[in-house]
């Protein structure tokens, strides 16, 4: 199997990937909290695991990937205080929490489909794993890692000496603002495993438990779903870098204390999409852009995928409509070059083609250097010494991983423009005249057509009408 290098947040280095149980790979991708649409920043955090899964599959591994839906328990504040995001949004919209989370989970599936992100082996919903979460908390309780407060069951982070190791947390100096001390917590990093329903408020989502009616903490959900679907030791866990400090740090603590042993071998984190001037995009920051907003503005979902692939997954990606507009132009220009290659069925210089193909896969295997791979594809399609057929074979091969529909030539924006009947008639008239070799008159008609915003592309025995854009 070719050697894949992955940057592991645990060691902060690129490591050679070795699965626990070759050729199987167990992979978990932290899913969305479904109280709103995913914004395009969130969606970036599902594109790089999609590339990773397809790359692993391409080189011969058998990947089982889980993506969860956090449909309960994610509070508006990481310090375990405040409302549940889903209950709050449901109350604002006059829907039930169940309806709301189901609606946004389906919307997420539509968005990722539009971005050619393939579905995981299974989507898991946190509300369907309540018993497993209770069982895990019981195990932690029996092992002495928890304590009770008036508000729920908490994990005592002082009992886990490795707490915060991945995040390299400086616990003493930890920003108080990040983890506000809550009245009954023993340590500021302790976190809720089970929250009791408030006495004065009826929650829509609540369950009986050994500690009283309540709901799970957000972090325990992921660990319980992972244990249940993949086991207590998995190969890869992905998510955005914002999760390193709290969510993933807490997942490690509770999982490793519950099962005793390493939880995840490779933590792979993707950097944020940021708005111009480095402002972060957030569902709660009021600068939300969803995929549907882009589509309404005339953008193609795959142009957004292309944009995200032109920067490395561990680098910030600056977003603005102008940046996306130029990415969309490049995306279609690349496809036009590929279309031209496909029209030449020649088979030149196979040796040079092999070198290009090797450079592309080597880039992908080097911690998913997709921008480099795309740069090599640009060089390939513009290289006159490589035959069209060789180019198309290479593009087809690697588009299995990139999933940019590079060989679909039906979606060029100009083809979506309806051609008026008047232009069709003029073009037919010109074609007849041209067949009779009256080139002067056919050129005149072509100019008339051009003055109306269209052009004619002649080939041997047919012509195409193309809008001038
Ligand atoms: P959430 O729905 O908030 O749990 O987030 C879903 C995923 O999106 C997580 O992996 C987050 O780390 C990630 N995420 C949140 N904001 C951004 C952003 N601006 N850019 C990239 N990923 C993000
Ligand atoms: Zn998670």
Image (tube, grey):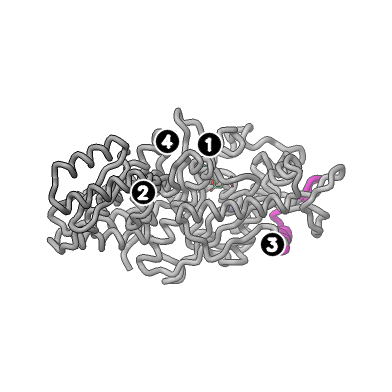
Which residue was labeled with disc 4?
318
Q: Quadrant of the N terminus?
A: bottom left
* Marker disc for residue 236: none
Rendering quadrant holding ligand 1:
top right
In the picture shown, does residue 402 fall above or below 231? Answer: above
In the drawing, does residue 234 fall left or right of residue 73?
Answer: left
The CB of the residue at mark 1 lies under 8 Å from ligand 1: yes
Task: Measure the alpha-carbon separation of dots 2 and 4.
Answer: 30 Å
Which residue was labeled with disc 1?
281
Residue 389 appears in the picture as rendered = yes
Task: Measure the alpha-carbon separation of dots 3 and 2.
Answer: 46 Å
* Marker disc for residue 415: 2
Image: magenta residue range: 131-152
Label whose residue precedes the other's in the sequence (4 or 1): 1
Q: Secondary structure at mark 3?
A: helix
Which residue was labeled with disc 3?
128
Task: Measure the alpha-carbon separation of dots 3 and 1.
Answer: 30 Å
Task: Measure the alpha-carbon separation of dots 4 and 3.
Answer: 37 Å
Q: Are marks 2 and 4 in contact (CB under 8 Å)?
A: no
User: Residue 105: where, in percent of width, then height?
Assistant: 62, 53
The foreground one among 125 and 315 is: 125
Q: Secondary structure at mark 4?
A: strand
User: Residue 329: where, in percent of width, then height?
Assistant: 34, 41
């Amino acid at each position: 199997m070719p050697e894949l290098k992955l940057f592991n947040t645990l060691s902060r280095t690129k490591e050679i990937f070795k699965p626990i149980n070759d050729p199987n790979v167990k992979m978990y991708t932290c899913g969305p909290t479904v109280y709103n649409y995913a914004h395009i920043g969130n969606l970036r955090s599902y594109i790089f695991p999609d590339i990773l899964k397809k790359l692993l599959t391409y080189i011969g591994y058998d990947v089982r990937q889980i993506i969860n839906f956090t449909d309960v328990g994610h509070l508006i504040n990481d310090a375990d205080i405040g409302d549940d995001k889903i209950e709050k949004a449901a109350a604002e919209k006059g829907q039930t929490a169940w309806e709301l989370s189901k609606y946004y989970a389906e919307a997420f599936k539509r968005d990722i489909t539009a971005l050619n992100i393939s579905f995981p082996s299974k989507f898991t919903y946190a509300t369907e794993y309540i018993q497993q979460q209770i069982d895990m908390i019981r195990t932690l309780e029996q092992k002495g890692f928890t304590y009770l407060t008036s508000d729920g069951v908490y994990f005592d982070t002082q009992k886990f000496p490795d707490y915060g190791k991945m995040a390299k947390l400086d616990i003493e100096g930890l920003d108080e603002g990040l983890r506000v001390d809550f009245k009954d917590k023993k340590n500021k990093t302790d976190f809720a495993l089970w929250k009791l329903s408030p006495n004065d408020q009826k929650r829509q989502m609540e369950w009986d438990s050994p500690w009283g009616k309540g709901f799970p903490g957000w972090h325990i959900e992921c660990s319980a779903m992972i244990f249940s679907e993949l086991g207590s030791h998995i190969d890869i866990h992905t998510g955005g870098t914002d999760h390193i400090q709290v969510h993933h740090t807490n997942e490690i603590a509770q999982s490793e204390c519950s099962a005793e042993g390493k939880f995840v071998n490779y933590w792979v984190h993707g950097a944020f999409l940021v708005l111009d001037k480095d402002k972060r995009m957030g569902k709660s920051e009021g600068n939300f852009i969803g995929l549907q907003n882009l589509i309404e503005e005339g953008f193609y979902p795959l142009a957004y995928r292309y944009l995200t692939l032109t920067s490395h997954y561990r680098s910030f990606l600056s977003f603005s409509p102008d940046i996306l507009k130029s990415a969309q132009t490049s995306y279609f220009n690349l496809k036009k070059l590929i279309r031209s290659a496909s029209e030449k069925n020649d088979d030149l210089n196979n040796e040079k083609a092999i070198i290009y193909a090797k450079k592309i896969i080597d880039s992908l295997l080097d911690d998913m250097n997709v921008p480099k791979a795309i740069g090599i594809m640009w060089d390939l399609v513009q290289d006159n010494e490589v035959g069209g057929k060789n180019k198309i074979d290479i593009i087809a091969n690697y588009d299995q991983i990139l999933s940019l529909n590079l060989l679909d030539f039906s979606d060029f924006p100009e083809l979506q423009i309806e051609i008026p009947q008047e232009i069709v008639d003029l073009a037919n008239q010109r074609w007849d005249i041209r067949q009779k070799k009256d080139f002067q008159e056919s050129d005149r008609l072509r100019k008339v057509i051009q003055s109306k915003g269209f052009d004619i592309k002649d080939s041997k025995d047919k012509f195409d009408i193309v809008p001038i854009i």
